[in-house]
Image (cartoon, rainbow, N blue to C red):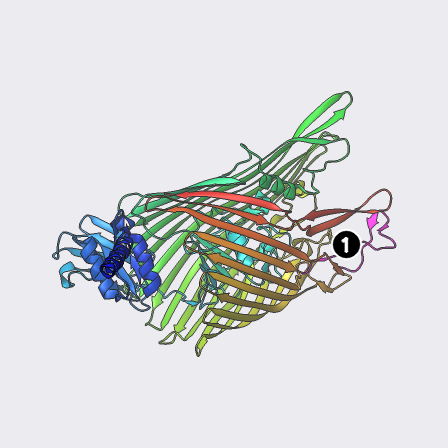
Amino acid sequence: MRIKKTVFLCLSALWLILQVHAQETTTPVPLEQILMQVTQTSGYRFNYAPATIEDIELAPPGDGLTIKEILRYLTDETGLQFSELPNKFISIRPASLILCGTVTDEATENPLAYATVQSGAEAVITDEKGYFELKIKGGEDQISVRFMGYRSFEGPVGDYKAGECLNIALRSQQLKLAEIVLYDYLIRGIDQLDDGSYSIDFNRFSILPGLIDTDVLQAVQAFPGIHSVNETVSEINIRGGTNDQNLILWDGIKMYQSGHFFGLISMFNPMITQKVSLRTNGTPSSLTDGVSGTISLESEDKLNQDFSGSLSGNFIDVSGFVDTPLGKNSSIQIAARKAINDFVESPTYSEYFSRISQDTEVENNVINVVNSDQSFDFYDTSLRWLWQISDSDQLRLNFIYAKNGLIFNENAEIGNDTETRESSLEQGTLAAGLNYKRRWNDKVDTELQVYNTDYKLQAINANILNNQRFLQENTVSETAARLNTNLSVDDRLQWSLGYMFTETKVTNLDDVDDPVFRRLEGNVLRVHSGFTALAYSSENRASVARIGLRYNYLSKLQRHLVEPRLSFNQRIGHGFNVELLGEFKHQNTSQIVNFQNDFLGIEKRRWQLSNDEDIPVITSKQGSVGLSFNRSGWLIKAAGFYKEVDNITTQSQGFQNQYEFTSAIGSYTASGLDLLLRKQLKNLTTWLSYSQLNADYNFQTLPEQEFPSNYDITHALTLGLTYETNRLRLATGWNWRTGKPTTLPDNQEPVINNTVNFQGTNSTRFSDYMRVDLSALYALCNGPGTRAQIGFSLWNLLNRENTVSRYFRANSMDEANAFSQNSLGFTPNAVFRVDF
């Protein structure tokens, strides 16, 4: 009897355990959770519309099942249709008449994002992986697929087996674009192409240390060899060049202003900027200017069928973005941004304002004059309108307006009365462009672009003690037209040619009311340019070469300039690439500094147009060779370069020593090495970059003919680390570089005859520059309709004082007073963004 009772208890316990286990394994869970588990265990990834699996729960499939058995179980339990795609992708769609497929490039097999797929009145856009789902009535329906630059596809649905996703390959109709040779060069979203340029795609962009917004001109400073000696986006130095030697384009429109907050943040709204192309050498013959580098910004070049938008706010500004269709063949994007200090002055704003006003008349006026009622504002508006006239014709309109404004009162006791006068500084850009593309056939396409860009810098300086008003203005107005034709000779050889006309007018005004003085200088230059290029690629694209030639005629100066261009990339073995780049270039505009207190000392650079006399046409030639290895998450790249730039002036180089008021013409040479080491793990990316530079001036008419350049950053080192999951992105970075050259007064006799007596030019340096940054972004929700994220950044985490600029003035005691500017101190920032 006792044995029977024991057996009964054991069986009961066993039954209870089995019941509990069965209850645990059959508890329904969301389908999304099951899909994530399948992805982790099998490596298969799923494509689906979020609404397709919304609110579906079921018991997880059993252990040890094959992927086919899992899909069969999920199909039986959910009624959904699971279809295998290439590259271990699985599409999920309702069992009703929903057509799915992937649109790819016929030659490269790469997915084509944002292609238009249509059947009758129904139309959809492919996602980033080229995938689409389209409602159809039946197998007799016709579908069409359109994508700019590719031949349209049309065909009946019934030609394909039911239950399978289509694979639609489109054939290119245009000159083949450069292809990626180094993916995720620094972080996700930054790649190097086979023409030597770098591409930043903000749709895929991860995060950089210290940045929580996709500030374009801050992001490019993460590359080896690119710095800002005074830590601003308006003073970016590429391989020893000055900022005015950089060509900045916004959808093909030349920009003469790049920064808000007088250079501390980018003028270009990150919400409307999709891609950035960075070139330090090997520029295509279709582009001119920018003897040191080219930064080209692009908005999205696609039609959008659904309304979307974004709202964002941080401790500096608020911004909004709207992307809305205007019918089936047109869409418009509008972005706007404004400073928040009208409502609240954050610690970030205060640190930025303190940075721009250091040792200027805004911060410290003359004795007996007190500044008050300081008011600063900046805002910008950008627009892009796209009209797909037909499968072969596209029209794009761009517009941008940006402005910085600073106003303050100067107060003084004159007699027994308090006198108050207003001083102000304004900087603004207004530009618009029209672009038309036409595909004539499979081999020929044409592009026509016209634009006008206007830039204005104006300062009114009230000298209250002398009852004087000093007005300064610097304006640039440029109109240009460019026609370019591309011809595809065959799959390996392409030929392009074109013509460009540019008219640039630069005006400078100095106006004093007492005593009356007025100086107005204006200059106009018209340039006619013809350009051509050949692009060749081997059958497997292991060898890619582009050679170009540009001819320029400067009508007023009666000068002819011929500029060859070259880029070559060779893939060797597994993971190795060799690149050769070279170019001759010129530019007709430059920025000069007349006096350190011009334009209130804040934005003291003014544009000047070459006249072939005291301001000659700047010319350059440079070459570089690079070797890279990319395999198993490792990327190692080294590039050596040499550059010569002729016909620079001392006024364009920002001298703050004995040559500050000297006018001389000379040149500089720059040579060095850029090195990058990057390693990718599962969720972690780390990189170490190093750049070495040797940049020297040569001015034959100066007492010291050769000496180090003002922008000679001999050594620069950056260590970065990013960590990324589905919702969290973290980045931290350490930046170190040798201090820029400077000139100190003589120790024994600092002042002679009321003039500062300097030591040897650039014979010493500022202390080494060092900065640690941190940033983080977290996605609060990633639903099908609305997404939100928050983030914070800490700039200069250690609050290190880095001196970036200093000049000297003699006082009545025969002493040399120093006027210094330091970089940003510890600067926190936070962001909240909603996409809908």
Residue 518 magenta-highlighted: no
Q: Position of residue 734 (x, y in %)?
A: 60, 58
Residue in front for this viewpoint, 553 or 429 = 429
Left or right of 443, for residue 98:
left
Residue 753 magenta-highlighted: yes
* SS type, badge 1: loop
Residue in front for this viewpoint, 286 or 401 = 401
Q: Position of residue 90 (x, y in %)?
A: 27, 61
Image vertical order of residue 34 relative to residue 696, above or below:
above
Q: Residue furthest top?
A: 416
Q: Do we see residue 707 in this rendering?
A: yes
**Pointer 1: what residue?**
658
Q: Which residues are magenta?
A: 738-761
Packing grade of label 1 (10 A; few <14, some 14-19, many >=20) is some
The C terminus sits in image quarter: top left
Left or right of 281, for residue 388:
left
Query: Residue at image x 37%, y 62%?
Result: 485
Residue in front for this viewpoint, 718 or 502 = 718
Q: Amino acid at mark 1?
A: Gln
The N terminus sits in image quarter: bottom left
Q: Residue furthest bottom?
A: 573
Majority SS type along the magenta span:
loop
Residue in front for this viewpoint, 619 or 460 = 460
